[in-house]
Amino acid sequence: MDAIVVTTTTARYRDSVLQKAGDSIKKLYTEQTQAKPDAPFSTDSGHLPCKKIFFIPSSKLSKTADRWVFRTIVSEAIQLLVEEKTVNIRSIVFPAVGCGLHGCDTTFVAETLLRAVAYELEQRPNLPLSVYFIVQSRDSIVFNKFAEQLKLLKSPPQSSARRSIVPRKPSAKDNAPVFERRVLDPSSDAYKEVVQQFRKTISDQHCKQIVRIENIRNKRWYRQYLAERDDFNYRLKGNTEKRLFHGCSEKAADSIMKEFFNRGFAGDHGVAYGQGCYFSLNASYSHTYATANDKGERRMFLARVLVGKTTRGDRSMKVCPPGFDSTTDGSHIFVVYRDSQAFGEYLITYK
């Protein structure tokens, strides 16, 4: 494998990897975990026949850990892989986290880890990556559970009531374009609602005219956002969705509508509260990043954003701190670190 994933609280597995990797990796691991115990990091392979070792903090891993704990392990490992610039990573291996001394339910673990990997790869369709899970040879039960869940994941989805599926003619909704921009009628309720929220926090000096408001329809993006929202609502027992603004250039807006809010561009809006994608309750703040084109027109999204459990951010944060879903300035700015946490529902063009 090019990269192996080590969860820092899985003592036997972690210590075995460090022993084989050698003293230099042991020393680096100690220094990193003492300096930032809750931050994921990567090291070289030492004496192991791989390219990188990804160490993922997992302080909340226990027999009763929820799905988010396992999803975070996968998400942080994939993020380290994406950010890796020194070597090409084309294969990665995860341990069967929680199936050893932690005593987690093996069906739950297998399903959650496999679905988490499927989700991350769906987010990055152009990422050439093979993902593996390693199971100890004596654990045939764990191996069989992973094989069973993988088979279910690959099979066509069934209805929740397990009824036979009756063929039907495609509806107009099924044949709708995958991506579409619809200009709103100024007399429509949707247009008036967007204008009201926009005008509430932007001055006439910054916006003398609204040129148009478009409803962005991107099927793949919206489905991923809804799946993320369902997960947030279930995990947090409530709705944490906010409608926030994001200003950008015309070129960036065109890219976002097709490729989502990409945290890979972190830094364009500063990194004072974390190296993610920035949104604000105040259109006046987002206006400062909405650069005008040669016609004097600016672009600003009114987006749905899942802020979840948020904490004060700082410029050192490349990923969201464990246990939180976003970072903030404590007032109007929110920073998210997962592409599917935000959906650009409307694009406002103004000057």
Image (cartoon, rainbow, N blue to C red):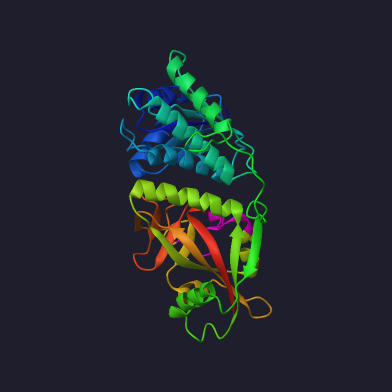
Is residue 301 one of those drawn in magenta?
Answer: no
> Start and end of the magenta stretch?
258-271
Rendered-image quadrant of the N terminus = top right
Residue 161's x, y, as percent?
47, 36
For the C terminus, the quadrant is bottom right
Query: What is the x, y in percent for residue 196?
Result: 46, 78
Q: Nearer the viewer, residue 303 or 39?
A: 303
- In this rendering, is residue 5 above or below 339? above
Q: Is residue 214 left or right of residue 304?
A: right
Q: Residue at x 31, y 32 (%)?
A: 62
- Nearest the viewer among 190 and 244 is 190
Residue appearing at x 54%, y 62% in the figure: 344
Let me know if residue 267 appears in the view.
no
Q: Main secondary structure of the magenta part?
A: loop
* Residue 76 coordinates in the image, percent (x, y): 46, 42
Residue 303: give x, y in percent of width and height. 50, 64
Image side of residue 71 versus residue 350, left or right: left
Q: Is residue 266 magenta?
A: yes
Left or right side of 242 for 127: right
Q: Residue at x 61, y 57 (%)?
A: 218
Viewer can see residue 326: yes
Given residues 159 and 289, the one toward you in this image is 159
Q: Quadrant of residue 140?
A: top left
Q: Identify whether 229 is placed above or below 154.
A: below
Q: Give the residue at x 48% y 20%.
A: 143
- For the residue pair 112 and 280, the one nearer the viewer reads as 112
The image quarter containing residue 329 is bottom left
- Reply above or below: 274 against 188: above
Count of picture labels = 0
- Considering every residue shown, the one lying at the far top of the view is 138
